[in-house]
Amino acid sequence: MLEVRTVRLREIRLPLREPFRISSGVTHDRRILLVQLVDGNGREAWGECVAGETPAYSAETIDTARLVLREWLVPRLLGGPIAEPAAVSPMLDAGVRGHRMAKAALEMACWVLEAECRGVALAALLGGTREVIEVGISLGIQPTPADLAARATAAAAEGYRRIKLKIQPGADVAFVEAVRAVVGPDLPLSVDANAAYALADAAHLARLDRFGLVMLEQPLDADDLRRHALLQRQLATPLCLDESITSAARAEDALELDSARIVNVKPGRVGGFLAARAIHDLCARRGVPVWCGGMLESGIGRAHNVALAALPNFTLPGDLSPSRRYWARDIVSPEWTMSADGRVAVPLTQPGLGVAVDLNRVDDLTVHLEERHA
Ligand code: OSB
Ligand code: MG
């Protein structure tokens, strides 16, 4: 039984060590909305909203999420007892369409609170079985193929198990070719277009087939399941969907249509852990591999993602880079690290998140704070 007495919504500003460019825009500093729950016994649990600064990746932004949380979502959670964390999504979904990133921030914090109350690790509460997860890196768009190849060489030397290259029209075939030439034929490579292409680019995208990519992620518009299926027929490279997969029903549609043969699961994109797990289970039943994507999260969001990625069908490396890849200093301790052979350890011995939130540092970084009580 959960009873949320206080909810704090706070925005922190966390500068990236270097800008991250994808086809839909560039991020310099992350504006991150953190959710802090406090229950009747003074137990605390943290959530993180993955919405971006601009409505480029999805319609939601940190500012829409804050509004929806404050006006519509937080009031539903306060006060009354909640039987279990699986009951939270139905409460938040009733009469509120969309806004899945806002919902997820609250829903995932409730799972953390339950894990704290029961004294179990979040990964264990979710049904995770894996103790280590393979890590992949997502490399932003660089000015030239040689620049990207240098980044890829460094990433391979650090031990990453898979390298994902962001692509866009004008920065694709030659860039992938340069990377394949320096990393050799065996390192798993993938590309992510963040919806930058059209179906008319099919013949051009088929030129990527000769690089033996593990997948081509989200080439077309998020709403376009049918055109992804038409594109898949013209490519040897398996398609993976990210932006398109907003729910288990959407994932089912995509698999029925053959719009995707691999699914990127981000709990923050789909409304939280309940939906993320449903997508995982659906894909497992159908023999479709999934992996955990990232949204340049702080160490709090990374803890959520690592816990989810411990589920058995997360068989491909996740975008779960260590803290130092993104930040001069993270907001959790210990910071997230990666072993020399490219793995992150799932914290299984401590209850809840498995990392401590550095409250002094969070306070220093806070630019906006609001609080609601039951
Ligand atoms: O498409 O996976 C994506 C970051 C922001 C928005 C969308 C995406 C990404 C990444 C970053 O690829 C992955 C990471 O967090 O390391
Ligand atoms: Mg993606």
Image: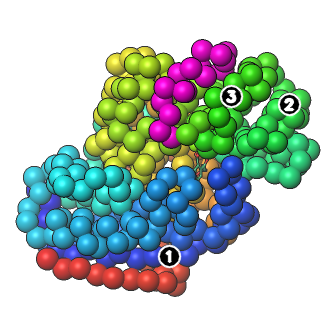
Ligand 1 contact, mark 2 (Cβ < 8 Å): no
270 magenta-colored: no
According to the image, label 3 marks what residue? 200
- Secondary structure at badge 1 equals strand
Type of the residue with mark 3: Ala
Q: Quadrant of residue 174 in the image? A: top right
Q: Earlier in the sequence, mark 3 or mark 2?
A: 2
Tell me: residue 201, above or below residue 98.
Answer: above
Give the CA distance from mark 2 to mark 1: 39 Å
224 magenta-colored: yes
Tell me: residue 64, above or below residue 209.
Answer: below
Label number found at residue 177? 2
Q: In the shown orientation, is residue 285 left or right of residue 296?
A: left
Magenta residues, as a range? 222-238
Mark nearest the camera among 2 and 1 is 2
Q: Residue furthest front?
A: 200
